[in-house]
Image (spheres, grey):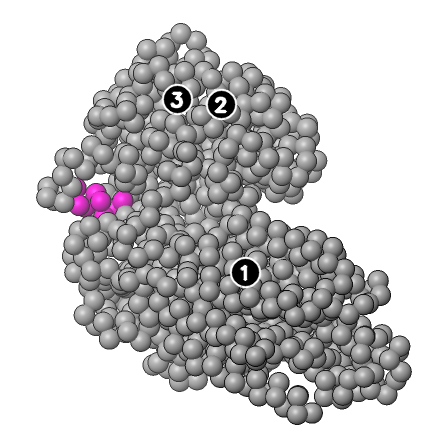
Amino acid sequence: MNLIIDFLVISGLILGIWLFNAPRKAKFGNLTAAFALFCAFALILYRHDIIGAGTVGISLLLGALAGYVVARTVNMNQIPSMVAIQNGSGGAAAFLVSLVELIRQGGSFGAIAVISGITGLAVGAFTFSGSMIAAAKLSNKMRQAPQVLPGHNYFVMITVWGMLAACVISFHVPPDAAVYLYILQIVLASLLGILFSIRIGGADMPVLISFLNSMTGMAAALCGMVIGNRLLIAFGAVVAASGYILTYLMCKAMNRNLLKVFLPDPPKMRSGVSIRSGSAGTRASGSASTGTRASGSASAGTRAQGKDMTETPASPGLSGVPGQHPSSAMTSQAPKSLGRIEKDKTPGDPFARAAQILAEAQKVIVIPGYGMAIAQAQREVTSLAGELEGMGKDVKYAIHPVAGRMPGHMNVLLAEADVDYDMLVEMDEINPEFSSTGAVLVVGACDVVNPSAIEVEGTPISGMPILMAHEAKNVICCNFDEKPGYSGVENPLYKKSRTLMLPGNAKETVRKLTEALLHAGKGDEDFISPADNGDSWVDNTPAHGDEAIMAGPGNNRLDGTPAHGDEAMVTPAGDGDQGMAGTGADMVGTVANEDGEIDNLGRAVQALAKAKTVTVIPGYGMALAKAQFKLLELASMLSEGGASVKYAIHPVAGRMPGHMNVILAEAEVDYDDLLEMDDANPLFADTDVAMIIGACDVVNPAAIEIEGTPISGMPILMAHEAKQIIVCNFDENPGYSGVPNPIYNNSRTIMLPGDAKATLEEILAAIKGN
Amino acid sequence: MTNLLLMLGFFIVSFLIGYLLISRIPSLLHTPLMSMTNAVSGVTILGALLLFTVPGNGTEKLLGSMAIIAAAFNVVGGFTITDRMLGMFKGKSKKSSAITTQES
């Protein structure tokens, strides 16, 4: 009878997995599996009497609550590291259970059960520490590049032999002493997990994460063997199988076998690191050579470079300023952003050419890679794809199985950006289509489109299946640079005559490409109807919104009049939202000359009215002024106008950890809009208005620009990268650190000194005063 | 001994069934799949629970409750995040953006 019930529960799990066959049913499948697990749990409770139900209940509640809250609040970009953390906690649970069982009945167990127990112990501890390292790497808390210690192999060998020895010895000592050997076993296995994980980096991460997944399943199954519980064994085995398949698929897709990924020989071969030498120099050369081909791997350096890129491409554009925007040309304060726009219109410009290619293509295939994930460009990519679809083109995404850092990474990213999953096509299905494709858009992918893999023998990627992008009529490549990817193999695709390179941060380049496409499209009367034009501000069409932003602030600072004509054309007053923009303009027009403060207020209102993306940075000053409710009022008004309002939360803003989150939650701000610093920072460069409310040190660029101040080296919110900054601080005095804040004197900054609540009320009144 | 063989058989059969089923899952859903099986691997919570069916000393209870916390975190967190992830996978009907939900 019990056996039948067990079978029923297990078939529940199997049904859940089976439902993962189709995206539509998967959600139900997940619930089914969860229900199966719940039944198994209930079954244990029914069959056995629990001693110490209080302890059990509290532990259960604590763990479940923590798991739920973390899973609910974690940013979607952090999924890989979150999965790794959960995996690690599964491993921890497995080795703890095995440990207790071994301690309890080590003597009475048969030899095989003890061996399973010790293996469970080792596998669990290994998974735990390995997953934690993986989580740190995936969340960029650790360098993603492989780290090879001097004498890495010796360490690994010593650990493995130590574990074997501990296992053997534990059979020949009394149970009391064996306990210490079990603990030693755990320590050694954890060490092995660390040693194992740190030297896996970059593109090999999907293999590691799948492998660890498989290992937790194994640990659970072994745990079940020790206890003698069928359900544990079955569930564990299914997980082990799943992890095994994913590991195998990832390896196959990268044309590497598991040993090659996990043993240090490949890095030695690929980056010239001599592992045997064991000298300190080994490490240095290892990191240097990995650094050179970091384009594929998410190192901190890549991010820093990305930041630079947002500024560099602007400068050459200034050379050819057509007379289309006379008022813009007059503006001296926003030359960079203007240059970007003008550049797009220059006929010989690569973006214009790329836009033309896209406009002429009937079929466009987008190939996303990890570079897209680093640049957080998925929304830009999908909005470009949306425009192309709107032009009647056949748009698809070609997904290489190992693109990204975990199995199916690109699918998740694109799903997050609302891509229809019917458009995501697997490698084998899409490859025959490339030869009939007009344009391929590569976004941050390198090795997976490297024709060397099939054309050249003897490279690390030879024989790896690739996406046949090179067969397409045209290839547009939005990669950061032309450096080889993780494999270190030069990509001949970049040099092909049919390939158009658009180097730089993908988020920037794709956005500019979309703008260029829309500019080109505007030439054809039938593409954008007048109605479209009118709504464009609300629709967040990048070209128009940006123009308004870029033309707006600079012009107003010179003198109000010429800009208004332009703006009236871009955002005709049609409904309430656009009325806001109008109000902003009026405010400047009418009250600009009265006095400085109101002028600033008018400018702030106008900037807010036109902003598509607003990032609010709250600080302790907001808490003091109790300005959060007014802030939410303003935020909801702005989002009704079509703007996206987010809150960037510095970890030390306020007076206790998470202070700002609590305060904003009190004002019923959706916590999805609360961004952690690391998530918020890459977004500032594309933020139209950064609104600082009672924060000083946490946005002080001196912390990263100037050496030797008390705050030097402190991570800050990069508000100074935003296109426009509004500061609602009480005064211009330095914050707690005493370091003057250069952001106050930035030409893009609008200062609104005074009590933050009063200031926000004034802004609200000005917007409503329409 | 027969018991052990039986358990081994259980393991192998489950592994095979899992293998056959999972091989058919599209790569589109690999991340949610991994996340879900990850949650399932928190099944050690059963083992942790069984530790409390026999009287134990303080250390054992401490280790046991730690195991329960870790496993519960894994199970609940895993299924929740999978659910969230799957919620993002949208078919033909595009979902409205987060901006509108915030206004309420």
Q: Earlier in the sequence, mark 2 or mark 3?
A: 3
Which of the pair A603/A59 is nearer the observer?
Answer: A59
What secondary structure characterizes most of the magenta part? helix
**How far is the residue under mark 2 from the one under mark 1?**
37 Å
Q: Residue at 43% across / 65% down in the picture? A: A29
- What residue did someone put label 2 on? A630
**Res A154 visible:** no
Q: Residue furthest bottom?
A: B2
State which chain disc 3 sits on. A
**Residue type pointed to by label 1:** Gly
**Residue type pointed to by label 2:** Lys
The mark closer to the camera, 3 or 1, is 1
Which of the pair A70/A104 is nearer the observer?
Answer: A104
Q: Residue at 18% across / 46% down in the picture? A: A520
Residue A632 vertical position relative to residue A353 in the rendered view, above or below: above
Q: Residue at 39% across / 82% down in the picture? A: A463
Mark 3 falls on what kind of element? Answer: helix
Residue range corresponding to the magenta coloring: A515-522
For residue A652, which quarter of the picture? top right
Mark 2 falls on what kind of element? Answer: helix
- Is A466 positioned to the left or the right of A11 in the image? left
- What residue did someone put label 3 on? A605
- What residue did someone put label 1 on? B78
Tell me the quadrant of the picture where the C terminus of chain A can be found: top left
Tell me the quadrant of the picture where the N terminus of chain A can be found: bottom right
**How far is the residue under mark 3 from the one under mark 1?**
44 Å
Mark 1 falls on what kind of element? Answer: helix
Q: Which residue lies furthest to the front in this view?
A: A1
